[in-house]
Amino acid sequence: MTGIEIPPSLGVYGDKKLAEEILGRIWGKRGVFTCTVANTLTSTIPGVSDAGDTPELTMFTPAADAEILISGKTTCMKGIPINPGGIPTPATLTKAALSLSAMPYYIVNGGCKIDPYVPYFDMGGECGEKITCGNSVKNVKESYEKGLMLGEMLARAYDFVIVSESCAGGTTTALAVMMAMGVLKENLVSSSSPKNPKELKSRLVAEALKAAGIEPGDLAEDPLKAI
């Protein structure tokens, strides 16, 4: 800890000591917030994602979230994204937090099916196919290299970067990547749903790895290929 104490008004979920250590490194410094938005058709598989009122509407969620953060309203759809229970997108909370912080923020388009109607950094990515096809993401190397360039650009102007994302179906695809790399041996990822469909996610990931012709851990040294 470097002389910073978390004020009583700020709650911490998890390790308070670690939170104090991180805040101590950035407190009072100039930061920037980024939100990377992207789509995967995996989110349209019924039951995978609650980041939309229907599986089809999950295609609009990343673009709508970006529009909420930048312009305070949605252009790509009527209303704002909600889950099947009617709970609004967490982007509403993020928008409020950014307004209070006065921190600069930018959108990064990692590969949207529906592009947001706001300015953004384009990483050259494309909407991912369903992971069960075994080869769902294109332009991986290009997106990675452009991401590095963007990080270097931001590092010249800011002391720290807060990285966030909006990608319906993202925890399922992340599970597939981590299983392919051997980072995880079982399903430990979270979900946009309060009832995490772990069995469905595990089955889809098993199908994805089989379709790709790889075993868990085969791509431990090749993360871009795993993606």
Image (cartoon, rainbow, N blue to C red):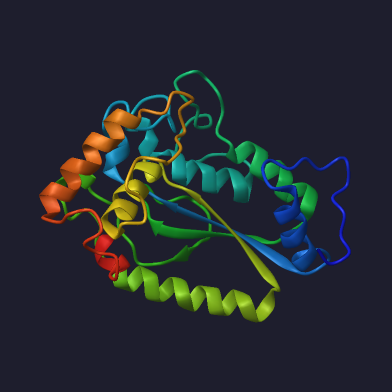
Which part of the image, by quadrant, shows the C terminus? bottom left
Task: Please state the horizontal and vertical placement of residue 124, each as a whole percent of the image.
Answer: 35, 67
Task: Please state the horizontal and vertical placement of residue 212, each as a whole percent of the image.
Answer: 13, 54
Q: Which residue occupies the extreme top position in the image? A: 85
Q: Image quadrant of residue 11?
A: top right
Task: Please state the horizontal and vertical placement of residue 17, each as a whole percent of the image.
Answer: 75, 53
Q: Residue at x 53, y 29 (%)?
A: 79
Asked whether residue 192 appears in the rendered view, the answer is yes
Could you tell whether 216 is left or right of 73 in the image? left
Q: Observer-nearest residue: 93 or 47? A: 47
Asked whether residue 113 appears in the rendered view, the answer is no
Q: Residue at x 72, y 61 (%)?
A: 22
- In the image, residue 190 above or below residue 197: below
Q: Image quadrant of residue 147?
A: bottom left
Task: Please state the horizontal and vertical placement of residue 128, each as a whole percent of the image.
Answer: 27, 51
Number of dots carrying numbers: 0
Q: Observer-nearest residue: 76 or 209? A: 209
Q: Residue at x 44, y 59 (%)?
A: 109
- In the image, residue 59 above or below residue 142: above
Q: Residue at x 31, y 54 (%)?
A: 177
Which part of the image, by quadrant, shows the N terminus? bottom right
Could you tell whether 115 is left or right of 26 in the image? left
